[in-house]
Image (tube, helix red, strand yellow):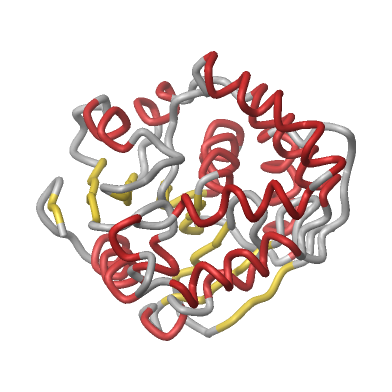
Amino acid sequence: MLNFERKGNGKETLVLLHGFMENLSIWSDMEPHFSQDFSLLKIDLPGHGQSEILGEIHTMELMADEVKKVLDHQNLEKVHLLGHSMGGYTALAFAGKYPEYLKSLTLFFSTYFADDEEKKQQRIKSYRIIKDAFPHYVRAGIPNLFNPNERDILEGKIETALETALSTNNMGALACVKGMVERTDKKHIMQNFEGKILVLAGKHDNAVKTETTIKHLPDKTNIKSYVLDCGHNGHWEKPAVCAEIINTELLHNLPKKLVF
């Protein structure tokens, strides 16, 4: 079973799925800002943190199945599910397979689109370097995921992100990259899911096409989106703002499509 941690005694369970080359520790800056009405369930996805590698390819559906095993083990249903980046792809796969488990779905600096051909080729070209020169791959990529206008302010957070990524098993990372290449478009999930959908995006996100993601959201009253003045890592760049939006949207209601 996947490694996980539970925290808090709130009546609403918020399940947190980290992104690629991250682990459950990434939520530490946000945790003090989450409402006490939430009980947090933080999970290490396969091949990350203290969770084992499960195969040569970690598809999003495989990872969703493993998340379900944790929920079943903890006797949880009707939870709020939030995923950062790759965690968002996993959350979408989960919503497609097990919608009855979910009150809400939050894409946290993530997208429902599959990779375009250029992105797929970039990932495929990265296989060898992930396998043979993982530290170089990490150091070349991680700083670019933060707001370029605030690199000096974010220096400590960038270092934390680098340390977190470098602690990841490179073969676990490789299995997930292969899974991300295979993932399919999930706009139909966004269209069909009946619970609340929350989308948090970064104006300076170099990993996700924010403008396209927001522009093509289905026009449904259960979907709300926010674009923040940050890069790909709102949990490190804007933890208090992100947590407050999540508190407000999942526990209350606000007008649609606000910009912070």
Q: Is residue 159 above or below residue 203?
A: below
User: Taking 148 as reference, is 28 left or right?
Assistant: right
User: Taking 251 as reference, is 71 left or right?
Assistant: right
**Which residue occupies 62% across, 19% down?**
121
Residue 49, located in which quarter of the rendered image? Answer: bottom right
Residue 5 or residue 10, whichever sits in front = 5
Q: Where's the N terminus, which quadrant?
A: bottom right
Q: Position of residue 124 (x, y in %)?
A: 70, 24
Q: Position of residue 211 (x, y in %)?
A: 25, 33
Residue 14 or residue 27, whichever sits in front = 27
**Which residue occupies 34% across, 55% down?**
148
**Which residue occupies 32% across, 61% down?**
250
Q: Position of residue 228 (x, y in %)?
A: 24, 56
Residue 3, located in which quarter of the rendered image? Answer: bottom right
**Which residue occupies 36% across, 44% down?**
195
Q: Is residue 5 above or below residue 63?
A: below
